[in-house]
Image: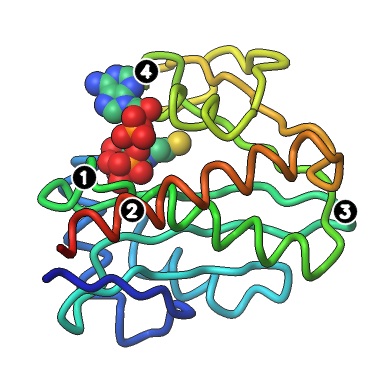
Amino acid sequence: MQQFKIEKMDQKHIDDILQIEELCYGAHHWSKDSFLTELNNKISSYKCIINENKCIGYIGFWKIIDEAHITNLSVHPDFQNKKLAQKLLLSMIDECYKEKIKYITLEVRISNKKAISLYEKFGFKSLGIRKNYYQDNNESALIMWSENIFNKNYKKLYDRIKENIINYEENNNK
Ligand SMILES: CC(C)(COP(=O)(O)OP(=O)(O)OC[C@H]1O[C@@H](n2cnc3c(N)ncnc32)[C@H](O)[C@@H]1OP(=O)(O)O)[C@@H](O)C(=O)NCCC(=O)NCCS
């Protein structure tokens, strides 16, 4: 039975994280210093998903007044397609609810169909493009936004996704 728990990111996770960064983003991944800086950034929140004492995925976001800006979401390739990114996004949204943050935004490469469909699942809509946003290959970024997550309809969507994840975990632990 595989167990996954979410905890606040800490310096002790950085070695695991750098391995995932390289596997997910190749040469153009975040450096150790970027993560250390983010861990000391007062507006940041970073969470890891843990399996057998190893960090196997993480999400980071900035909290700016009533908006959350996702800066990073990555899952180790060996653990992808197990709904762990969805678990991390739900945990981020929980924090937004607690801290009265209404809107969530992010940039994603226009070629990253999987991530885009994941964010669409969470009701995020693309509201613009930042041309040539990524320096490695000049790729453009899609800018995606949630609606106000306190809206009744959004809460229903959030509850539905949460229920799906609970059912998925129960079925996989039988
Ligand atoms: C994007 C990423 C975070 C998703 O993590 P994950 O744990 O595999 O995602 P989940 O299993 O929670 O959800 C995947 C969802 O994506 C969608 N999806 C899966 N494979 C897909 C594909 N080939 N094409 C389109 N959509 C796909 C489905 O909606 C799926 O949800 P479902 O299983 O409920 O149907 C992960 O693939 C990753 O780390 N990629 C590299 C880094 C990256 O691109 N990060 C995003 C930066 S914005």
Residue that badge 3 annotates: 66
Residue that badge 4 annotates: 113
Would you place residue 165 above or below residue 11 in this image? above
Task: Count how many numbered circles sit on residues in the image.
Answer: 4
Label 1: which secondary element: loop
Colouring style: rainbow
Label 2: which secondary element: helix
Residue that badge 1 annotates: 80
Sequence-first tag of 4 and 3: 3
**Disc 1 versus disc 4: distance between alpha carbons?**
15 Å
Contact, mark 4 vs mark 3 (Cβ under 8 Å):
no
Cβ of mark 2 under 8 A from ligand 1: yes
Place residue 16 in its image quadrant.
bottom left
On the question of residue 28 being in view, the answer is: no
Cβ of mark 4 under 8 A from ligand 1: yes
- 61 with respect to 88 (left or right): right
Would you place residue 62 above or below residue 24 in this image? below
Contact, mark 2 vs mark 4 (Cβ under 8 Å):
no
Q: How crowded is mark 2: few (under 14 residues within 10 Å), some or many (20 or more)?
A: many
Three-letter code, disc 3: Asp
For residue 84, which numbered disc appears in the image?
Answer: 2
What percent of the width, then of the height, locates residue 100?
A: 86, 62
Contact, mark 1 vs mark 2 (Cβ under 8 Å):
yes
What percent of the width, then of the height, locates residue 130?
A: 63, 18
Three-letter code, disc 1: Gln
What percent of the width, then of the height, locates residue 139?
A: 43, 16
